[in-house]
Amino acid sequence: IINDHPCRRPEVCLKITGIEEACRKIPNTYVFATVDGAQFEDLDVPNGVVLKKTAILKDFRKSQTVINIATAKSHSSAGVSLCLKNLMGAILAREPFHKEFDLHQAVADLATAIRCDLNIIDASRALINGGPAGPGDVEYTKSIVAGRNIVAVDAVGVTLARWYKKELKPRDVKHILYAEKHGLG
């Protein structure tokens, strides 16, 4: 099952990314993107500092193996969007993350409740400004980062590009720092 909760209309996102077409010939593979609240269920975040509960895709909770695949991009509110920030693609209500909570703390809190077996950043190209949706400048890093530890993967990923025309270190991205403080990396 390949799923996402996109910011834009689901059918448009599936077409633009090409993921549905790319997976069409793979047996027993189901690709969907949804904004339908019926596809979500409550998830408690017992170790959350600001985030205590959110709604998550039902299929995500049922999965035996979770692989988190993020594209490297800048983000107007979070600075960068890598694997930690990518977890927001599995939840229904993203607006509170941006309006009610400290976004960085809420992203780190979410990572305490969603554990991924493998985290991959496609940093073959990075949207280094104008993100998350663009338009913006693209830097071709020709890199892929993968690992079991989401904080370590993001810590490496943030060093691969010059975000907003400057080099960032992992400690410069608050949600990476907060996730480490949660003991996640």
Image (cartoon, helix red, strand yellow):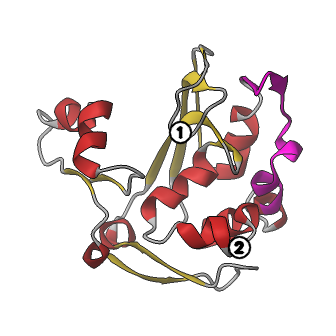
Residue drawn at x 44%, y 62% is 90
Q: Position of residue 54 (x, y in %)?
A: 51, 79
The answer to whether residue 176 is left or right of residue 113 is: right
The answer to whether residue 55 is left or right of residue 124 is: left
Closest to the observer, 29 or 173: 173
Disc 1 target residue = 120
Residue drawn at x 83%, y 55% is 177
Closest to the observer, 21 or 68: 21
Q: Secondary structure at mark 1?
A: strand
Graded by Cα atoms within 10 Å as few (under 14), some (14 to 19) or many (20 or more), the crowding at tag 1 reads many
Graded by Cα atoms within 10 Å as few (under 14), some (14 to 19) or many (20 or more), the crowding at tag 2 reads some
2 inside magenta stretch: no
On the rendered image, what quadrant is the C terminus found in? bottom right
Q: Which residue type does callout 1 highlight?
A: Ile
CB contact under 8 Å: marks 2 and 1: no
On the rendered image, what quadrant is the N terminus found in? bottom left
Q: Is residue 72 above or below residue 124?
A: below
Q: Which residue type does callout 2 highlight?
A: Phe
Residue drawn at x 46%, y 67% is 91
Boundaries of the magenta span: 161-178
Q: Position of residue 132 (x, y in %)?
A: 56, 40
Closest to the observer, 59 or 20: 20
Disc 2 target residue = 101
Q: Position of residue 166 (x, y in %)?
A: 84, 24
